[in-house]
Image: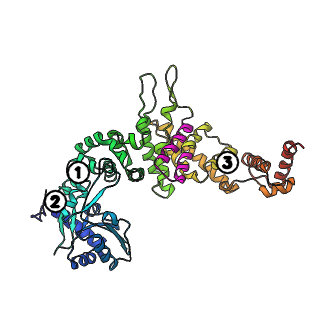
Amino acid sequence: MNSTPTNPATDPGSIAAKIAIETLTQSAPLSADLAARFAAEGQTLALVGGPVRDAILGRLGNDLDFTTSARPDLTKKILNSWADSVWDTGAAFGTIAGKKGEITVEITTYRSEVYDAKSRKPEVDYGDSILGDLGRRDFTINAMALELTTATPEFIDPFDGVADLARKIIRTPGRATDSFSDDPLRMMRAARFASQLEFAVDQEVIDAMKSMADRITIVSTERVRDEFVKTLMTASPRIGLAILVETGLAEYVIPELPKLKLEIDEHHHHKDVYEHTLTVVEQAISLEERLGGPNLVIRLASLLHDIGKPKTRELIPGGGVSFHHHEVVGARMARERLRALKFSNEIVDDVQQLVFLHLRFHGYGGGEWSDSAVRRYVRDADHLLNHLHVLTRADCTTRNQRKAVALSETYDRLEEHISRLMEEEELNQIRPDLDGNAIMGILGIPASPIVGKAYKYLLELRMESGPLGVERATEELLTWWAENQPKS
C-alpha cells in the first residue's frame, strides 16, 4: 500500500497527481467551491474512482464521482446550497447526486458493501476512512482519490493504481476472488474496462473469472445487460467480447457467441464464424458515421447476424458446408436472446429484422436489380435501410481483394439505384395509389377484410410497376374486383 509520494520531482504518483489536479481545475473549477463547503462542515471530500483515472489520462468528463465522510443527509444539505438541482434516488446506497451548470456530481459516503452468497443486492455499511472505501473498489485504476479538503489537494493511491495505469493492466486491489465474490458484476466490468481502455487483464483476474463465471447468475438481468451494452459500445468491443468468451462468462450472458466457434474438419472448410462475427462488428463500427455515430442496434445486429449458423450447419458431400436459412433461424434466436436480456421491444424488433434481412442483398445475383426488387428491398428495410446498408457492407470479410471490391461496387450500384428511385417515386413512403376509403368508395362496399385484400393487391402492383396514377389504379382495382368479389 502506498502513501502520498514524497519525491514530487520524480515519483509517478506525484506526476499523476499534478496532471489530475490540473485537469480537474481546468475542466471542473466548481469542484473547489464544493470542497470548501464540505470543509466548512468539518467533512472531507475527494474526487474518486473513474474520474481520477480519466483526469490522469487527460480526458475528464462532466460526470464527477466524489467520496466523503459526510453522511447522506448532510451531503444533501450541502448540495442543496450549491447545486442547481439535487436528487437522492441513490440515498439507500449512500449516494446523493446534483447538477450545477454542465457538471453532474455523485457524492457517496465512505462505505463498504458486501454481497451475500445468494444476494442480488449489496448490504451497505458506512465507513470512516477513505482507505477503507478505496479498498472495496473494483480495480486498482479505480481505487485512486484526490482529496480536495486538505490545505493542498492530496493524491491517494494505496494500491499502485498509477503503476497499473502506466502498465495498462486491469488488477483488483485485493484478491480477485474476494472482489468478485462481493460483486460478481465486476467480472463483466473487467471486460468492459479492457475494451474501453484497451488494457490487458491480469492473469489472476482472468483465472478468478473462469472459476467464478457462474456467479454472474445472482446479478439482476438488467445490470448484466447494461454492463454488456457498455462493453459493446466501447471503441474496441472485440477485446471485451473475447474476454467474456475466454472466461466462460459469455455462456451465461450471451451463449450464442461462443457457439459460433464451430468445429471444422479437414475436408469441409468454411470461415471461422466467431472471428468473422467479431470482424463484422469492427467493420460496422467503422461505418457508423452513416448512422450518426455509435449505434447500439447496428452493433447488436452485427454481433448476432450469424447466430443461426450452428443450428443450420450441414456438411456437403464431397466437401463444403451450408447454412441454409440461417438468417431465418438467427432472427428468431436474436429475438429470444434480446428479450431474455430485457432489451426494449423497439431494439428487439429492429435487430431481429436486420438479422432476417442481412442476406437479402446476396439473393440478387450479380447486382442487376430490377426496379421492383429495389422497391421491395426498401419496403422490407423500412426505417432500417441505412442500418441494412451498414450491416451488408460490414458482412463482407473476404480476404480475396478482387471479390471484396466487386461486392462493394455492386452494393454501390444498388445504393445509386435506390437513390434514383427515391427521387422519382418517394420510395420511403411506398403506398398504393388508392387508400382504403377510395377503395370502399369505388367498389361501393363497407369496411371489411376484402378491403384489406384489395389494398394489398394494389400495393403489390405499386411495388412491381411503380406509381400507377389514380385512373389506372382504379381500372386495375375494378378488374381485380370482377374476379374476386364474393359470390352472393
Q: Name the residue under label 2.
A: 12
Q: Which mark is first along the chain, 1 or 2?
A: 2
CA separation, marks 2 and 3? 62 Å
What kind of residue is marked 2? Pro
Q: Could you say which disc has been placed on residue 172 in the image?
A: 1
Name the magenta segment's main secondary structure: helix
Outermost residue to the right: 488
The mark lying in front, picked from 1 and 3, is: 1
Location of residue 257 in the rendering, given as x and y in whole percent from the top left corner = 42, 39
189 on left or right of 360? left
Q: Could you say which disc has been placed on residue 375 in the image?
A: 3
Q: What stretch is highlighted in magenta?
A: 326-353
What kind of residue is marked 1? Thr
Q: Which mark is first along the chain, 3 or 1?
A: 1
**Considering the image in quadrants, where does the C terminus appear?**
top right
CA separation, marks 2 and 1? 20 Å
Residue drawn where x is 43% and y is 31% of the image: 262
